[in-house]
Amino acid sequence: MKLTVDTGKCSGHGRCYSLAPDYFDCDDEGFPIVLRPDLTAADVVAVGDAVANCPERAIAILEEG
């Protein structure tokens, strides 16, 4: 599974890196940088709050394959 951020939708609220700092950081303008794009099942649980709390729904977990 892959963790992605649609930068066209993101407004830089920062909830993702506040809720899942092991998976997201921010750039100089406050927009998220995905630190760990390849996810295990345990990682999906760990980023769940960040995905659910993104106001723009810009964060996605994509199935590979």
Image: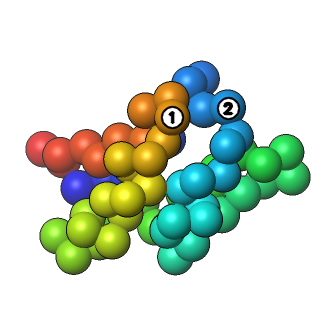
Sequence-first disc among 2 and 1: 2
- Disc 2 or disc 1, which is closer to the eye? 1
| Residue occupying the far right of the picture | 28
Against 19, residue 33 (above or below) is: above
* Quadrant for the C terminus in the image: top left
Q: Quadrant of the N terminus?
A: bottom left
Label 2 crowd bin: few (<14), some (14–19), many (20+), radius 10 Å: some
Disc assigned to residue 11: 2
Q: Residue at x 44, y 47 (%)?
A: 53
- Compared to residue 24, the image places residue 6 above or below, namely above
Using residue 12 as the reference point, say whether residue 19 is left or right of it.
left
Q: Is residue 6 visible?
A: no
Report the amino acid beneath label 2: Ser
Q: Is residue 59 above or below residue 45?
A: above
Give the crowd class for mark 1: few <14, some 14-19, many >=20 residues within 10 Å: some
Label 2, label 1: how far apart the Cα atoms are: 9 Å
Which structural element holds mark 1?
Answer: loop
Instruction: Find disc 1 in the rendering and name its residue.
Output: 55
User: Residue at position x 44%, y 55% from top?
Assistant: 50
